[in-house]
Amino acid sequence: MTATSPPRRGRGRPGNDQAAVLRAAVDLFNRKGYDATSIGDLAKELGVTKPAIYHHFDSKEDLLRLALDDALDELTTVVSNASAGSGTAYARLRDVIHRSVEVLVAHQPSVTLLLRIRGNTAVEQGALERRRWLDDRLAELVRDAVADGALRDDVPPDLVSRLLFGMVNSLVEWYRPEGTYDAASVADALVAIAFDGLARGQA
Amino acid sequence: MTATSPPRRGRGRPGNDQAAVLRAAVDLFNRKGYDATSIGDLAKELGVTKPAIYHHFDSKEDLLRLALDDALDELTTVVSNASAGSGTAYARLRDVIHRSVEVLVAHQPSVTLLLRIRGNTAVEQGALERRRWLDDRLAELVRDAVADGALRDDVPPDLVSRLLFGMVNSLVEWYRPEGTYDAASVADALVAIAFDGLARGQA
């Protein structure tokens, strides 16, 4: 993925044009599907010409790569820090889940796209590989916390990480930024349910 | 939804043909998207003619309706029984979550389809209305269990039901029937995490 060209910030158009095109592309990919969306569709959506889009981006795949990097970069930083950090595995796991919710909410459109891709192109395969790396780091943290005696050991660690991240990722389907709950409240609720349980008198 | 015609079991072809066509349709809708799939695509996939499909089903929408009913009927029974049942709200909620996992696993392809539709047709809108009814019944059970003092009251009940069902629904993305865990093990793990929490020494 590092071999493809960076966004062309220097070509004489303001950077916010480029960001707006990328945002519109992500929304359109989420609505119509990446495969079914053409640069022509995107130009029409934005009310510009196709060359106006190619002024900023080499190709549709270039847009996809930037969108998936947007979904993955911050999450990768959060998970890397948790993996390498000090403190107990339990505290780092609890913290990384909390932060993951906040990252997902901050990047909801691009994370939605990430969760829908199926590996049809090299760019998608690269993103899925990065997702697997994240999943592996989290599964390691879960195993470490079990080994420390901080997490229950009657549920298989790989099932724990699947279900934890299933609950986090489900946010893309229903979370609305304009709704009642901000990211921090949802993160608090999710962490409380997952780690302390819903049943009363447990904590 | 009750006004549309039932499957044509009596038209002289064995019923298992019809079930096989429906299964293939659900798989194709999940892979290509419902809107992008034609009866011609389905016929090609099955290696039959279009009239062979119309022998069993009136229309593409007829196939969609049957698939969504397959996803919803058993879940509706489970949730209705839990709503109307005896026992504490807490026990009924715990049980309905367990059963929902089992129903999802047993009907994974059609539930996957259900979770992807966006309401573009009358059939889809009918299914989304049935989903909302289920969500409302579950939110009621959560509120009742909080009112009984059995569930923690520091997480808003609507957030609890969103996150609980987010975790259940996430199964469609990663559960593999041929994998290590059967439906009952996954249901046990999910219920243990959600109600008793991951942290050790809580139960």
Image (tube, coloured by chain):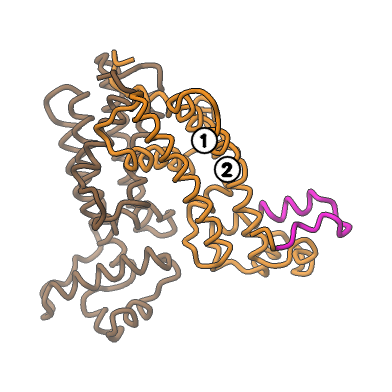
Chain colours: A brown, B orange
In magenta, the rendered stretch is B4-23
Q: Using the image as rendered, state which of residue A22 and residue A130 is in the foreground.
A: A22
Query: What residue did someone put label 1 on?
Result: B83
Quadrant in the rendering for residue A143:
top left
Quadrant in the rendering for residue A113:
bottom left
Badge 1: how crowded within 10 Å, few (<14), some, or many (20+)?
A: some
Label number found at residue B76: 2
Q: Which numbered disc, 2 or 1, marks the residue that appears first in the sequence?
A: 2
Circles 2 and 1 on the same chain: yes
Residue type, numbered disc 2: Thr
- Give coordinates of residue B106: x percent, y percent: 60, 38
Q: How many marks?
A: 2
Query: Does residue B131 lie above or below A151 as drawn?
Result: below
Q: Using the image as rendered, state which of residue B129 and residue A77 is in the foreground.
A: B129
User: Can residue B178 be seen from the camera position used here?
Assistant: no
Query: Does residue B169 lie above or below A64 as drawn?
Result: above
